[in-house]
Amino acid sequence: MRDADVKTWVSNRIKTGQIDKYLDGDRDFIDDNQVFGILEENSDPEPSRVRDIIRKSLEIKTLSAAETAALINVTDRGLLEEMKEAAAEVKRRVYDNRIVTFAPLYTGNYCVNNCLYCGFKSGNSGLVDRRALSMEEIRRESEILAGKIGHKRLIVVYGEHPLTDTGYIAESIRNIYGVKVKTRNGFGQIRRVNVNAAPMSIEDLKMLHDVGIGTYQVFQETYHHGAYRKMHPSDTLKGNYKWRLYSMHRALEAGVDDVGLGVLFGLFDWRFEIIGLVLHAIELETKFGIGPHTVSFPRIEPAMNSPVSDNPQFKVSDDDFRKIITVIRLAIPYTGMIITARESAQMRRATLGMGVTQTDASTRIGIGAYSEAYDRQQEARQQFILGDTRSLDEVIREFSEMGYITSFCTAGYRCGRTGECIMELLRSGQEGRFCKLNAILTFREWLDDFASEETLRAGEKVIEKEIREVKEKLPAFYSQLVSYYERIKKGERDLYF
Ligand code: SAM
Ligand code: SF4
């Protein structure tokens, strides 16, 4: 593609009219000084206040920025322990012992931006063999993910470039949903396509809504204006902080009512970033009645030719990382929380009980890496280095041994339990009823189609316990569950409540 064409494309991307209407004069909803002020004013919270805040969170109510700051500033070991226990309890109330798995699918590494921490940045001259997957290649990757590994959810990741623009994204979503592969006992399909891509206009987002996009994720990276400027050169698209900050407003306007927020931890003080996330959630709840469906909290990993990523100025320690997870769980209690294979197996294990609800497995982030032999040459095309490369089978076995049920349920989204409606159901614990039943059914499908002998044994123990619980706690649904369950064992697929 000619440089001039790329430039023209870039210059038409940002529609300032779609940001201006939300601004207060020139100001967005993150006031850096105010955030520092909130952290300062709540620097030494009374234990009784901390306990009141914890109680509010246990009622599944979003905390204010000041309440979140108070939790951030707790240092007393006993109180921190109470916070951790409450975070685990919040997770149980909203999500019970369910965990959701997914796989990332990297579609290409072309990018017009130059984020200092990312291996895909346009200035990375070491990345010589840039490419984007063809639709045929995307189908092949999806067939392996759905037919051999057993994933039903993907997070599809896109650089920002005219070669992988919204038309390409929409077509790839359509192709992924079109995949249907024979498995051991039934067939495999990708039932939910989540997307991590650059901010878009309302018109573009409507296109993605029309092809059935799942969650639309855009990480703000850092909420601090100064740090954002340093990391994202001003002559790039991503250099526009406000275009990114209001991307979820535009998504919700376009009818994409599942949105995912995130921070790339290491770019600025983590305390500031958590307040930014909470202010963002409150802003969306206030304006649209819908908060983030998920929150992601990646820590920067080393990336090729990106010194910032090798030695981040605000590197987050393991202890602080665990505190970050606890505070986010308490501050936005209804939200799904995603930990990825950037983290080690040990860290992922530890954070499950602290509030995490979703994780990836069998992860490959090279372009085309699921279908091709994974060699050193391809590793160079990766965005960063992974911390946990275990297979989905191994990860599920471990979850089962820990008493978690892996849910492949995507029913809630397909029968309209989304957006404002899901917010209410999650808060009241009612969504959990459907989720529990659908988790059993989808886990049965997976065990029959993909599990190794060992994982099958561990998984069946969990299923038996879950079925007993349905009989005791949800007797009205028991006979229907058993009927669906038996049909699934005979090879029927995709039966849900
Ligand atoms: N290009 C789109 C964008 O930037 O919004 C979406 C794809 S980008 C590859 C997805 C996310 O990867 C970014 O939002 C960023 O948080 C994360 N990321 C980039 N470099 C990273 C690194 N070195 N370590 C960990 N995560 C990184
Ligand atoms: Fe491009 Fe996203 Fe990487 Fe930035 S983080 S260089 S926008 S792929």
Image (cartoon, rainbow, N blue to C red):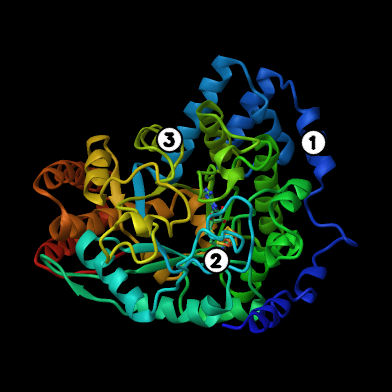
**Which quadrant of the figure has residue 194?**
bottom left
Q: Amino acid at mark 2?
A: Ala
- The residue at which mark 3 appears reads as 351
Which circle's residue, 1 or 3, is located before the other in the chain? Answer: 1
Q: Position of residue 223 (x, y in %)?
A: 71, 48
Front residue of 296 and 59? 296
Dot 2 crowding, Cα within 10 Å, few <14, some 14–19, many 20+: many
* Apparent side of residue 283 relative to residue 409 in the rendered image (left or right): right
The residue under the point 81% across, 57% down is: 28
Which circle's residue, 2 or 1, is located before the other in the chain? Answer: 1
Q: CA distance from mark 3 to mark 2?
A: 26 Å
Dot 2 falls on a residue whose secondary structure is loop
Residue 454 appearing in the image:
yes
- The residue at which mark 2 appears reads as 197
The residue under the point 66% across, 56% down is: 285
Q: CA distance from mark 1 to mark 3?
A: 28 Å
> For disc 2, does the CB lie below 8 Å from ligand 1?
yes
Q: Image quadrant for the N terminus?
A: bottom right
* Apparent side of residue 137 relative to residue 47 in the rendered image (left or right): left
Asked whether the beta carbons under mark 1 and mark 3 sit within 8 Å of each other, the answer is: no
- The residue at which mark 1 appears reads as 36
Mark whose residue sits in front, 2 or 1: 2
Residue 332 appearing in the image:
no
Q: Position of residue 219 (x, y in %)?
A: 60, 55
Q: CA distance from mark 2 to mark 1?
A: 30 Å
Front residue of 282 and 32? 32
Numbered badge on residue 298: none
Ligand 2, image quadrant it occupies:
bottom right
Dot 3 falls on a residue whose secondary structure is helix
Q: Position of residue 155 (x, y in %)?
A: 43, 62
Q: Is residue 123 above or below residue 223?
A: below
